[in-house]
Amino acid sequence: MRMHRKRTICHFIATGLLFCLCGVHAFALGPGALGGNRYRVIVSSDIGGGDEDDIQSMIHYFMYADLFDTEGLISSPPQKGRKIDILKVIDAYEKDYPNLKTWSKTYPTPDLLRSISKQGATDPAPERGYSQSTEGSEWIIRCANRTDPRPLYILVWGSITDVAQALYDAPSIKDKIRVYFIASWNLRQDPHAFGYIDREHRDLWMIFCDTTFRGWYMGGDQADDLSNAAFVPHHIKGRGALGDTFVPLKGGSIKMGDTPSMAFLLRGMPDDPTQPSWGGQFIRRQDRPNWWVDNPDPDLREADRAGAKTVNRWRADYLRDWQKRMNRCAAKQSEPSQ
């Protein structure tokens, strides 16, 4: 009995050590888009408005655009951002496209990206949470109703205005979409649109990311060239037109607070937000069937930001991967394109 107990304890210790060792490496994650899974995506962004980090995130997204079926790029509130600001980033992408397509034939053409860029609402919703349909909200409905068994992921980088309008105009799309909402400041810019969703669409599939996203630029491995300020001159500067566009943004430092919504699809198991991913690990809201929120565990806080360590624990992995991607803008590959 004593020998059996000793073996059991040794096995428990060995298993725990293995878990600790594996838990900090990318192979502990699900495959995501980098592992060959292909997801349908719409980005709803306030790009060009009050914060340059949406431009940073759009540049990052385009570097991985060969892995997704991008169906829409929507300009949403608040402030002064418009569709033309999306088109400006596509213009930079067009200059790098000849190099990018040598790495992968599935990079979307610049003309395709322009054709799916849409103007959404320009003002927050009134108190009821919805107003008039927009080109952006109508495009969400059109894409959601396509004959495709895969869910449509809507990554919300600004106010959730156009998603709320689409749900009001066509509530039947609810079962076909999945929303990853970078809340925080974005929520405060249009609380009525969010309030409508919260009231009337309690069964919507939603990741309500209020603080977890902060881990993209707070904490984690920031040694040497991995710091927010050092990474840009070392690994972004001189990497094509997209790199040149990125360099002056946010004082030449990484923020990219919306990028975790896309990183959630890059590496992890998007069907289950409770599992680890580059875009965070969430807990289910108890009163909602398909609603996930920041994990309040004190051990996962970075400063006072709940859940942020579920992102920044992967910082070296996702930055090194992005570093390799940015090199695609600077030089043609020596291997056949995929």
Image (spheres, helix red, strand yellow):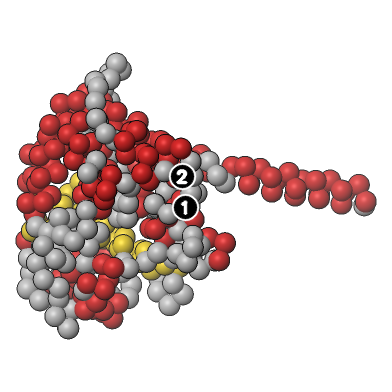
**Residue at horizontal 62 percent and vertical 42 percent from the top:** 21
Q: Determine whether the residue tagged by mark 2 lies in a helix, strand or loop.
A: loop
Please identify the residue farthest to the top as the structure is shown: 334
Left or right, residue 26 beside residue 183: right
Q: Determine whether the residue tagged by mark 1 lies in a helix, strand or loop.
A: loop
Q: Are marks 1 and 2 in contact (CB under 8 Å)?
A: yes
The residue that disc 1 covers is 219
The one of 112 and 220 positioned closer to us in this rendering: 220
Rendering coords of residue 34 (x, y %): 37, 38
The residue that disc 2 covers is 222
What is the spatial separation of the Cα atoms under label 1 and label 2, in whole angstroms?
Answer: 7 Å
What's under tag 2, amino acid-wise?
Answer: Gln
Mark 1 burial class by Cα count in 10 Å: few <14, some 14-19, many 20+ = some
Rendering coords of residue 158 (x, y %): 22, 62
| Residue 22 marker | none
Left or right, residue 14 beside residue 247: right
Rendering coords of residue 120 (x, y %): 10, 62
In which quadrant will I find the C terminus? top left
The one of 12 and 20 positioned closer to us in this rendering: 20
Q: Quadrant of residue 118?
A: bottom left
Rendering coords of residue 24 (x, y %): 55, 44
Left or right, residue 337 beside residue 18: left
Please identify the residue farthest to the right as the structure is shown: 2
One can see residue 159 in this view: yes
**Residue at horizontal 10 percent and vertical 76 percent from the top:** 131
What's under tag 1, amino acid-wise?
Answer: Gly
Q: Quadrant of residue 230?
A: top left
One can see residue 29 in this view: no
